[in-house]
Image (cartoon, rainbow, N blue to C red):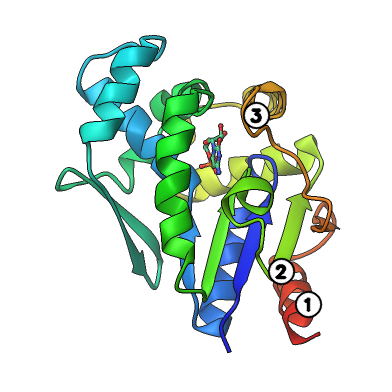
Amino acid sequence: EKFNIAIDGPAGAGKSTIARLVAGALGFVYVDTGAMYRAVTWKVQQEGLLPDQEQEVAALANRMQIELIPREEGQQVIVDGVDVTKEIRTTAITDHVSQIASYGAIRQLLVTLQKQMAISKGVVMDGRDIGTHVMPDAEIKVFLTASVKERAERRFKEMQNSGTCTLTLSELEQDIARRDQLDQDREISPLRRAHDAVLMDSTSMTIEEVVDEILGLCKD
Ligand code: C5P
């Protein structure tokens, strides 16, 4: 029997790793919605637009094509035929994505696409507004958090391992706190725990423990 799982939370809480593992364990499809906001931000930069040109950004988003392809190692992202999977993770994108994601026209467009992806059920979707706006009827909802310090440390280790370490630990901590603020304070669908979402603080939990706890919720 198929159902949907919504995983929301602040940047760096481990949502994508956990959502991917949960989807794998259940044979469900993993959808990373943050990648869609990042894809729009990439296209904006590609076209030489400034992030504050709201009208132009919205028009561009309406004519671009985003493809999300589920793969074993994660989700592949294709924008107008170009594989941007790696590029959308760079700081050049991360620095501007929350501003792009605050525009009503952008959210409306992407939320519509995300809702379509959830119709068939068997979807694990992660983001900021999945339990509140995209899949308010999801059978399982999780709000995943961790302390800012812990989240920054995890990002730091990740970057060290992939050899893409361009920021110091304290810069990462500042960046995470800044994005939390932008995501929580925006007017349209701000980052909030849905009233029926299970709160999980992963600060002192391993990835496996969080995954097991979510799989446990699925059995009830
Ligand atoms: O999850 P990730 O860190 O890749 O998301 C990048 C940014 O996209 C977030 O900081 C947030 O501003 C935005 N976002 C959003 N709503 C979502 C997913 C991401 O506003 N559902």
At label 2, the amino acid type is Ile
Q: Quadrant of the N terminus?
A: bottom right
Q: Is mark 3 within 8 Å of ligand 1?
A: yes
Q: Position of residue 126 (x, y in %)?
A: 58, 55
Q: Residue at x 22, y 24 (%)?
A: 46
Residue 151 vs residue 20: left or right? right
Q: Position of residue 67 (x, y in %)?
A: 27, 53
Residue under pointer 2? 140
Mark 1 crowd level (few <14, some 14–19, many ≥20, 10 Å Cα): few
> Along the line of sight, which residue is nearer the eye, 97 or 152?
97
From the viewer's perspective, is the residue at label 2 or at label 3 nearer?
A: 2
Residue under pointer 3? 183
Q: CA distance from mark 1 to mark 2?
A: 7 Å
Residue under pointer 1? 217
Residue 22 vs residue 70: left or right? right
Q: Secondary structure at mark 3?
A: helix
> Along the line of sight, which residue is nearer the eye, 205 or 100?
100
In the rendered image, which quarter is residue 196 located in? bottom right
Q: Quadrant of ligand 1?
A: top right
Q: CA distance from mark 3 to mark 1?
A: 27 Å
Marks 1 & 2, CB-CB < 8 Å contact = yes
Decide which of tag 3 and tag 1 comes sooner along the chain.
3
Q: Position of residue 189 (x, y in %)?
A: 64, 34
Q: Position of residue 59 (x, y in %)?
A: 27, 23
At label 3, the amino acid type is Asp
At label 1, the amino acid type is Leu
Q: Residue at x 75, y 68 (%)?
A: 210
Q: Is mark 2 within 8 Å of ligand 1?
A: no
